[in-house]
Amino acid sequence: MNSMRVNQVGAAFLIAAVAFGGSWGLGSLLVPHRAAAQTAVPMPQSTPDDGQDPPIETLLAHADAAKGHEIADHQCAMCHSFAPHGPSIIGPDLFGVMGTHIGDIPDYEFSEALSAHKKDVWTPALLAEWLKKPDAFAPGTKMAFPGITSATDRANLVAYIQTLVEEKN
């Protein structure tokens, strides 16, 4: 490529950059940016959160186990089984876990963080606390799950897990 051609290509880029910048500047002058007077879709107003959820017993009185089953299918089933005597996948089988000692599921190795709670029993309140933020409940847990922020969703999930019990004849 000769120097004349290099100069032509350089000039073309320079002219294009000036044209783009000029059109952008002219467009900004002719069509100024204004914020919308109101949003196109009204957003629900939330009440200030004081960080306190209603007691789980209150939430469970209105919980929907079917919705909890949906939450379990979408958020938990990739790592946990919910079948009677189901396999441990990445996490342990959760069938019948309610009322058992924390970290006391045969053939599953729990993290030291969760094993430190072995004296505790899974109750609706403890399970809801765990589901809210596992790493806050047991810092250093192996469970890579950020938690469920909605107290209603946690209650629905706890209600579902409470249904996972062996039927007695």
Image (spheres, rainbow, N blue to C red):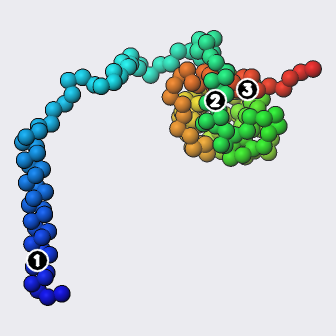
Q: Is residue 132 left or right of residue 95?
A: left
Compute the Cα span from label 2 to label 3: 19 Å
**Label 2: which residue?**
70
65 w.r.t. 27: above or below: above
Mark 2 burial class by Cα count in 10 Å: few <14, some 14-19, many 20+: some
As drawn, which residue projects farthest toward the right? 169
Type of the residue with mark 1: Gln
Q: Which residue is at a point 13% across and 81% down the rendered structure image?
A: 6
Horizontal relation, residue 37 to residue 125: left or right: left
Quarter residue 111 falls in: top right
The answer to whether residue 158 is above or below residue 113 is: above
Which residue is identified by label 1?
A: 8
Query: Dots 3 and 1: beta carbons under 8 Å?
Result: no
> In front of the other: label 2 or label 3?
2
The reply to whether residue 43 is in sight is yes
Name the one closer to the observer, 136 or 41: 41
Residue named by callout 3:
98
